[in-house]
Image (cartoon, rainbow, N blue to C red):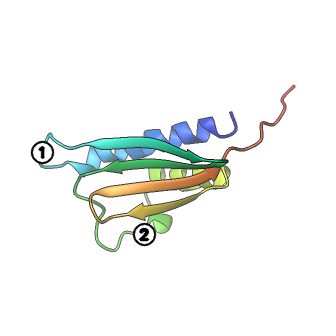
Amino acid sequence: METAIPLGLIINELVTNSLKFAFPDTDKGSITVALETEGEEHNLIVADDGIGLPEGFEFDKTDSLGLQLVNNMVAQIDGNITIDKSQGTKYSINFKELDYKERF
């Protein structure tokens, strides 16, 4: 729960952004969501083969409420995020599963 809910919000926001912005002049393209695990380390990948991010775009200094949410959720799971803009946009989020906090 401590990790799954933030990951769901991250995936939702990044896929929504791809659908809205990555393919403006075509109805073709692909979006990939993958989770790779090695030991206790996890890598969530959300990628598209669209037009990519604007030149000079700084993910950690964006005015976009959705991308601010992504930054906050990545911080909440003690993860880090990298962006590859070489072919479309690829977000890689590295994290470890958080310990479950006992509730009532």
Q: Quadrant of residue 32?
A: top left
| Circle 1 Cα neighbour tier, 10 Å, few/some/many (<14 / 14–19 / ≥20) | few
| Numbered mark located on residue 54 in the image | none
Which amino acid type is shown beneath numbered disc 2? Answer: Glu
| SS label for mark 2 | loop
Q: How many marks?
A: 2
Q: Which residue is mark 1?
A: 26
Q: Earlier in the sequence, mark 2 or mark 1?
A: 1
- Say if 16 sits above or below 90 in the image: above
Horizontal and vertical percent position of residue 23: 20, 48
- Say if 101 sits above or below 60 in the image: above
- Please tell me which residue is depicted at 27% across the width and 50% down the height of the picture: 21
| Circle 2 Cα neighbour tier, 10 Å, few/some/many (<14 / 14–19 / ≥20) | few
| SS label for mark 1 | loop
Which amino acid type is shown beneath numbered disc 1? Answer: Thr
Q: Quadrant of residue 100?
A: top right
